[in-house]
């Protein structure tokens, strides 16, 4: 009689012996064969005895699963090991898939036991504080097996649903865009100040824990060993810990034992207006649909839409006025939160002189809590705390200043046209500013504009540059103004008429906007595509420097 084999699919947790369950230890001890990824085998080496070891590389999961099934069918006890939990991006599902392909059934096939472990979302959360105290989801950013379009939809849904998000496999040496696009999606739904925890190698000797924000998380090292936990709109930071409130403050007073709502009153509808109660749910749903349809007809802010919908429900008798007033008090602070407006201002396309009135206007707009930063690109960056950003822009424009967004947009960096004495090409500079200034692109892009062949403002070192000569323009692409390997842009065209120049720039920016990767610098994009609207990329060759005999 053939001995029935057994597959032990084991999750051994984050990697420290202290966090391996007793059942996982027993299963490893009783196994005849241990099958796993090289790093995982090394992590549990202290638990191994004389078992046969089958170890493979990172991308050989299928071969491990097939070998595990083969050995189990020979009557052996085979342990397939995964870090974290074997059923969360681990080997459990793949083992079952291989078994199913071979016609396995539980009654007649090898025995299968899946042994749970502590998944990364749990181990990493414990090191950060209590960030996963409410509804959460895990999303793997690896698109080797799942199309990126599907992953992006899941990120979008998590953002819309205000889920706490744990990102697995966030970035590797080749996969760098996914974490960038994920950040951009989530920033549509929550503040850049949303707390984010980055945990690398939790509970291992190389453990690293970083507390940052959604807006700044990409400034830190994130790799395959990092789990990224992104808070929801309620998550707070207190004394270096990420905390997500469960919602007890809605019904309970947390600073004293005696509660204003008695125990027998806590489940009453008036004390839980957000919950579904025993009334006519269909009537409530229809009232809500009607309210949404009515308020959607007029463009409103999110706060206005919410308040309009609530008012309609009150009028229809679905909600009590007292309940709405209490909820409005709780939510009012959220709706009234001021924004931090960040804009770039300058006195003009070629004008570099700020008047006293303009400086006074900037000081007045910024106030005591804002910031003014001068940049080497002839712009002044203003950071203003305001709930009326359009009003701020209007005041600055009324003072004669150009106002532009900052970030991944096009900015024009023009010369001063010899203190505005050589203005033959000035109309083209103004038109470029009007047509392309502030255009959203994959990464901030500067257009350098020189009003004569001297190009004394360093325009030819910018991403796109144009130099006015004898009534026509020379066009340059792919400069790198800063860095150890800084270099001028490549001259791709000479003698362009103004209309030709504007057409070429428009096509170039359209291609970059459509085909550039997120955060991809223009010079890298030009090199990658090789041919940009008919202009061919050539690698920059540094000039050969020969020391003269005289030493001059």
Image (spheres, rainbow, N blue to C red):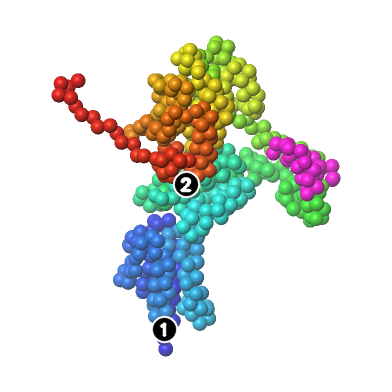
Where's the C terminus, which quadrant? Answer: top left
Question: Could you tell me what secondary structure mostly forms the magenta stretch?
Answer: helix
Looking at the picture, tell me which residue is in the foreground, 181 or 440.
Answer: 440
The answer to if 300 sits in the magenta stretch is yes
In screen coordinates, is 325 left or right of 531? right
Looking at the picture, tell me which residue is in the foreground, 146 or 217.
Answer: 146
Extreme left residue here? 549
Query: Disc 1 or 2, which lies upstream in sequence?
Result: 1
Looking at the picture, tell me which residue is in the foreground, 338 or 131.
Answer: 338
Q: Position of residue 69 (x, y in %)?
A: 43, 74
Query: Can I make out residue 133 in this image?
Result: no
Extreme top residue here? 356
Q: Secondary structure at mark 2?
A: helix
Q: Which image quarter: residue 474?
A: top left
Q: Secondary structure at mark 1?
A: loop
Seen in the picture, residue 449 relative to 120 is either above or below; the reply is: above
Extreme right residue here? 316
Q: Position of residue 547 (x, y in %)?
A: 19, 27
The answer to if 398 sits in the magenta stretch is no
**Residue located beneath label 2 in the image:** 177
Q: Position of residue 394 (x, y in %)?
A: 64, 22
Q: Look at the image and give the residue range highlighted in magenta.
A: 288-317
In screen coordinates, is 259 left or right of 473? right
Instruction: Give the residue at x 61% y 20%.
Output: 397
In screen coordinates, is 118 left or right of 542? right
**Residue located beneath label 1 in the image:** 3
Residue count near mark 2 (Cα–Cα under 10 Å), binned few <14, some 14–19, many ≥20: some
Q: Are marks 1 and 2 in contact (CB under 8 Å)?
A: no
Instruction: Give the residue at x 79% y 55%.
Output: 281
Query: Can I make out residue 301 in this image?
Result: yes
Instruction: Give the residue at x 76% y 45%.
Output: 292
């Amino acid at each position: 009689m053939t001995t029935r084999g057994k597959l032990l699919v084991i999750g051994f947790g984050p990697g420290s012996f202290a966090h391996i369950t007793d059942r996982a230890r027993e299963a490893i001890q009783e196994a005849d064969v241990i099958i796993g990824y090289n790093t995982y085998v090394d992590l549990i080496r202290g638990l191994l005895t004389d078992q046969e070891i089958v170890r493979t590389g990172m991308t050989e999961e299928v071969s491990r699963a097939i070998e595990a099934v083969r050995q189990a069918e020979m009557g052996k006890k085979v342990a397939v090991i995964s870090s974290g939990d074997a059923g969360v991006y681990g080997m459990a599902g793949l083992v079952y898939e291989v078994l199913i392909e071979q016609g396995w059934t539980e009654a007649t096939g090898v025995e299968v036991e899946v042994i749970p472990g502590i998944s990364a979302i749990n181990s990493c959360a414990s090191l950060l504080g209590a960030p996963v105290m409410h509804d959460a989801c895990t999303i793997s950013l690896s698109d080797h097996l799942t199309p990126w379009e599907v992953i992006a939809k899941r990120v979008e849904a998590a953002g819309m649903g205000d889920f706490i998000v744990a990102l697995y496999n966030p970035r590797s040496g080749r996969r760098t865009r996914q974490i960038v696009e994920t950040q951009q999606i989530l920033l549509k739904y929550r503040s850049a100040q949303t707390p984010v925890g980055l945990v690398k190698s939790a509970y291992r000797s190389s453990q690293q824990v970083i507390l940052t924000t959604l807006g700044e998380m990409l400034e830190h090292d994130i790799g395959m060993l990092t789990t990224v936990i992104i808070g929801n709109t309620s998550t707070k930071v207190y004394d270096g810990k990420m905390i997500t409130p469960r919602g007890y403050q809605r019904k309970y007073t947390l600073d004293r034992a005696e509660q204003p709502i008695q125990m027998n009153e806590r489940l009453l509808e008036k004390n839980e207006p957000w919950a579904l109660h025993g009334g006519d749910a269909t009537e409530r749903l229809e009232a809500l649909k009607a309210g949404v349809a009515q308020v959607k007809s007029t463009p409103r802010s999110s706060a206005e839409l919410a308040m309009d919908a609530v008012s309609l429900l009150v009028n229809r008798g679905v909600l009590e006025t007292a309940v709405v007033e209490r909820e409005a008090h709780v939510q009012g602070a959220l709706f009234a939160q001021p924004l931090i407006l960040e804009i770039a201002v300058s006195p003009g396309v070629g004008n570099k002189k700020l008047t006293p009135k303009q400086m006074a206007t900037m000081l007045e707009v910024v106030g005591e809590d804002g910031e003014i930063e001068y940049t080497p690109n002839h712009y002044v960056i203003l950071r203003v705390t305001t709930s009326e950003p359009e009003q701020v822009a209007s005041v600055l424009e009324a003072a004669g200043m150009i106002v532009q967004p900052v970030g991944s947009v096009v900015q024009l960096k023009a010369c001063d046209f010899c203190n505005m004495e050589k203005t033959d090409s000035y109309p083209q500079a103004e038109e470029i500013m009007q047509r392309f200034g502030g255009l959203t692109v994959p990464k901030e892009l500067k257009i350098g504009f020189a009003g004569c062949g001297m190009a004394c403002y360093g325009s030819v070192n910018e991403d796109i540059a144009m130099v006015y000569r004898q009534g026509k323009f020379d066009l340059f692409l792919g400069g790198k103004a800063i860095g150890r390997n800084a270099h001028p842009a490549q001259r791709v065209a000479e003698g362009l008429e103004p209309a030709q120049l504007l057409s070429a720039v428009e096509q170039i920016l359209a291609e970059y906007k459509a085909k550039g990767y997120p955060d991809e610098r223009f010079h890298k994009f030009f090199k990658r595509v090789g041919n940009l609207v008919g202009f061919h990329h050539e690698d920059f060759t540094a000039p050969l420097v020969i020391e003269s005999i005289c030493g001059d």
